[in-house]
Image (cartoon, rainbow, N blue to C red):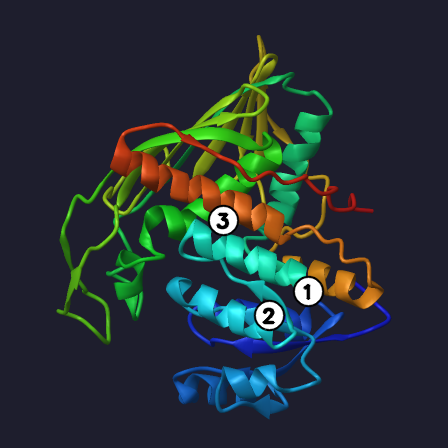
Amino acid sequence: MKENKTVKIGFVGVGAISGIYLENITKRFDNVEVIGVCDLIRERAENAVQRYNIPRLYDDMYELFADPEVDVVLNITRPDEHYEVTKAALKAGKHVYSEKPLASTLEQGRELVKLAADKGLLLGGAPDTYLGAGIQTCRKLIEDGVIGDIVGAAGWMLCPGHESWHPDPEFYYKRGGGPMMDMGPYYVTCLVNLVGNAAQVSAMTKRTFLKRTITSAPHRGEIIDVDVPTFYAGTIRFENGAIGTLITTFDVYNSANNNCLEIYGTKGTLYVPDPNMFDGPVRVMLAGEGKKDVELAFDNRENSRGLGLSDMARAVADGSGKFRANCSQTLHVLEIMEGFAVSGETHREVEIRSRFDRTEMMPLKK
């Protein structure tokens, strides 16, 4: 992605997901540059500065926000910290790209979107995996009418939780965490890009284990109190009449259906690759025919995290303000996910009021 201007990124949070962002921003996307980093654990920021030859190490995020050379703040703090960090950055006059979710609550998300609009700033966020070769190819197949009109969809994200491998897993079981807020953004973002806006949602939810024991270092043996549902069985009624189902859970050890998504059409079924990945495979099974692999029609097959940020940086550089992973999308996804939680608590269907316009697909590969 060659651009006339290199957009300078200030990095807030240098935790587990930061490595791939730093790799791609410093080596893959040449329209963005990491100008400085900060983290509550200073050693993490120091390591990033040394490894990636980053010019500046800030004492805290407020020093970063005060740097006039920072164009965009990249917020990859813990989920329940996204709101405060993004709000402070916007108030300081910075464009913001945030890891998922946009915020821990719909109310917070709406506040951030309004603040960005009031200040004339761009606000975008993860996930950007739907911009990869796999899901973009799926969207093209749907728009080309290969599987006909969409009838429904189904997705599954099933795992036993993160306390066996993550170095600091407690936040996954606190506000802003859980299988829906953690992994749901990949699946819901994929669904709304392939099927369209959601109109209503409903769900059943539960906490299967009220306490979890950490078995990974350095907190091995510590007990986590589980504060959020760890099993969601959700249903989406889309504006076009299609009905989707989505299960996300930290309570399942093995399943034949995992990390997968299917779109059902009047002419056949589309097998979508793992929404947490950029690559394929993409498969189609049309009525009366066998399952066939489809050649990917787009670039970005490898782990391209930061692709959405790079696309947003282009919109900052050219002044258009138009980019794909924008806050109208992340807000719609947040409302759907919160709607699942509300429905699980109240045993009723929840109306989805936000809307977003799907942006254009990525360029076809040459």
Residue for badge 3: 276
- Is residue 22 visible in this depiction of the protein? no
Q: In the image, what residue occupies the spot 49% across and 68% down? A: 76
Mark 2 and mark 1: Cα distance apart in space: 7 Å
Residue 308: percent from left, percent from top? 65, 57
Number of other residues with Cα within 10 Å of mark 3, as a class: few under 14, some 14 to 19, many 20 or more: many
Q: Report the amino acid beneath label 3.
A: Asn
Residue 349: percent from left, percent from top? 37, 27
Circles 2, 1 touching at the beta carbon (< 8 Å) = yes
> Looking at the image, is mark 1 or mark 3 nearer the viewer?
1
172 or 364, nearer to the observer: 172
Q: Earlier in the sequence, mark 3 or mark 2?
A: 2
Q: Going by the picture, which residue comes out furthest to the front?
A: 118
> Looking at the image, is mark 3 or mark 2 nearer the viewer?
2
Q: Report the amino acid beneath label 1.
A: Leu
> Which of the 4 image quadrants contains residue 25?
bottom right
227 or 355, nearer to the observer: 355
250 or 238, nearer to the observer: 238
Q: Report the amino acid beneath label 2.
A: Leu
Residue 63: percent from left, percent from top? 55, 88
Quadrant containing the N terminus is bottom right
Tell me the element at label 3.
Answer: loop
Residue for badge 1: 121
Q: Earlier in the sequence, mark 2 or mark 1?
A: 2
